[in-house]
Amino acid sequence: RRASALIWATNSASPNAVEVVRLLLEDGRCPVNARDGDGCTALWHACRHDRTDVARVLLLEAGADHTIASRLEQGTVKEAAAAPSYAA
């Protein structure tokens, strides 16, 4: 469930979400491109929840793959970012 911890942190409205994401990634046991049950990555969730601060960490510091598509209607990160946001 390590991917779940990273995805939970990207969905968090906490002002400490960036630090939590960094800690999980630095630990080395949370793969940056791991997927949840819908095939969504932490980057997908960060974009969907308008967490640009978290998305920057995932992309620029951890090398997240922005081309991974989910199995949801808003499949790619670009589509997730363009969709109306909702509260975490």
Image (spheres, helix red, strand yellow):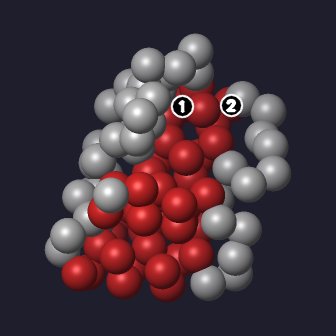
Camera sees residue 67: no
Residue 28: image location, x then y, percent: 18, 74
With respect to residue 57, does 81 lie above or below? Answer: above
Residue at 68 percent across and 31 percent down: it is: 82
- Residue picked out by circle 2: 82
* Other residues around mark 1 within 10 Å, as few (<14) / some (14–19) / many (≥20): some
Which amino acid type is shown beneath numbered disc 2? Ala
Residue at 29 percent across and 47 percent down: it is: 34
In screen coordinates, is 32 left or right of 16? left
- Residue picked out by circle 1: 78
- Quarter of the image with the N terminus is bottom left
Which element carries disc 2, helix, strand or loop? helix
Residue 81: image location, x then y, percent: 63, 37
Which element carries disc 1, helix, strand or loop? helix
Q: Quadrant of residue 36?
A: top left
Residue 50: image location, x then y, percent: 69, 52
Q: Nearer the viewer, residue 27 or 47?
A: 27
Q: Nearer the viewer, residue 61 or 69?
A: 69
Camera sees residue 32: yes
Which amino acid type is shown beneath numbered disc 1? Lys
* Other residues around mark 2 within 10 Å, as few (<14) / some (14–19) / many (≥20): few
In screen coordinates, is 88 left or right of 58? right
Extreme residue toward the front, this view: 1
Q: How many marks?
A: 2
Residue at 47 percent across and 56 percent down: it is: 7
- Quarter of the image with the C terminus is bottom right
Circles 2 and 1 in contact, beta carbons < 8 Å: yes
Residue at 44 percent across and 19 percent down: it is: 71
